[in-house]
Image: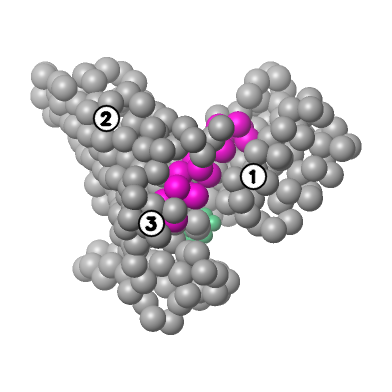
């Protein structure tokens, strides 16, 4: 993350389109500077925020866009796991910040992707695992611009009979029905005419392996989107400008957890 600004600015100086891994940058000020550098150079910048490209997340968005549940007024975006993420990525145990910065960033992005941009955020965090430095549990309340309220809850300290890693579970309530994405990639959509149940499992690409195939397929999908947008001259779904709004939620969550106050997102993005 510490290298991102220098590398993106180097790409901008050479007018080379850039993909930057999440988290965007060490600070929101760096991220804003990176967006400005790319705008000034006239090059596209995409943040590699791949979770919204997962097959089950795309299916939830499609169900909501179809209008069958009416206007959404409440949502929950949940990632609760006891998976030993530290054996593959030992650096995750070392940082002062952990779950919001590494994983919650994805969940917050999904909340924005499904229910739209956020006006205000309130967060609580804690560390359950004493062997790591950062927080491994976070509960975040979001006030969306469209008037809906959602909860983003993430945990790496949750031990259940079925380990759901790396699934994001989603509940959306609307004026005419409800959407439930539950463990095992099961999508249930209830509306005035009844209930539809669908399997929205990701495919296992030839080079992929379980349980990571969901994420691996989304990496393929975001790269495909990048090349499609480059060819068509279109802005990517997770452009630098878009991802500033997700990154602001990460910064706001740490600020709110520390101060116990609700953070106004608009003032962070000015
Ligand atoms: O997205 C990531 O960078 C990963 C994981 C999905 C495990 O959070 O760290």
Residue on which the image places disc 3: 259
> Regarding mark 3 in the picture, which secondary structure is present there?
helix
Q: Which residues are magenta?
A: 238-254
Kindly identify the residue that appears in the image at 67 percent across and 46 percent down.
30
In the drawing, what numbered circle is on residue 185?
Answer: none
- Does the magenta segment cover residue 253? yes
The tag earlier along the polypeptide, 1 or 2, is 1
- Does the magenta segment cover residue 56? no
In whole angstroms, how far apart are the C-alphas of marks 1 and 2? 28 Å
Mark 1 crowdedness (10 Å alpha carbons): few <14, some 14-19, many ≥20: few
How far across and down, in percent of the image, does residue 214 sit? 44, 49
Residue on which the image places disc 1: 29
Mark 2 crowdedness (10 Å alpha carbons): few <14, some 14-19, many ≥20: some
Position of the N terminus by quadrant: bottom right
From the viewer's side, name the closer residue of 133 and 183. 133
* 267 lies left or right of 10: left
Mark 3 crowdedness (10 Å alpha carbons): few <14, some 14-19, many ≥20: few
Kindly identify the residue that appears in the image at 11 percent across and 19 percent down.
192
- Does residue 178 appear in the picture of this structure? yes
In whole angstroms, how far apart are the C-alphas of marks 3 and 1? 20 Å
> Regarding mark 1 in the picture, which secondary structure is present there?
helix
> Regarding mark 2 in the picture, which secondary structure is present there?
loop
């Amino acid at each position: 993350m510490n290298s991102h600004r220098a590398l993106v600015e180097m790409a901008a100086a050479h007018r080379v389109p850039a993909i930057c891994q999440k988290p965007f940058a060490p600070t929101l000020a760096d991220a804003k500077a990176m967006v400005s550098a790319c705008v000034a150079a006239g090059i596209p910048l995409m943040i590699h925020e791949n979770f919204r490209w997962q097959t089950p997340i795309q299916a939830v968005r499609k169900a909501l866009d179809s209008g069958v549940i009416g206007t959404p007024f409440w949502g929950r975006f949940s990632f609760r796991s006891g998976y030993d993420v530290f054996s593959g990525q030992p650096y995750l145990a070392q940082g002062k910040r952990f779950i919001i910065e590494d994983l919650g960033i994805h969940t917050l992005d999904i909340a924005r992707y499904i229910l739209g941009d956020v006006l205000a955020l309130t967060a609580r965090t804690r560390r359950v695992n004493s062997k790591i430095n950062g927080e491994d549990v976070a509960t975040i309340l979001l006030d969306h611009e469209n008037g809906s309220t959602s909860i983003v809850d993430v945990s790496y300290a949750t031990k259940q009979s079925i380990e759901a890693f790396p699934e994001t579970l989603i509940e959306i309530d609307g004026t005419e029905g409800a959407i439930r994405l539950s463990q095992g990639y099961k999508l249930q959509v209830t509306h005035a005419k009844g209930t539809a149940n669908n399997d929205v499992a990701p495919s296992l690409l030839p080079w992929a392996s379980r349980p990571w195939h969901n994420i691996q397929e989304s990496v393929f999908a975001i790269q495909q989107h990048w090349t499609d947008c480059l060819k068509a001259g279109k802005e990517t779904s997770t452009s630098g400008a878009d991802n500033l709004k997700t990154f602001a939620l990460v910064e706001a969550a740490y600020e709110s957890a520390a101060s116990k106050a609700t953070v106004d997102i608009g003032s962070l993005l000015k």
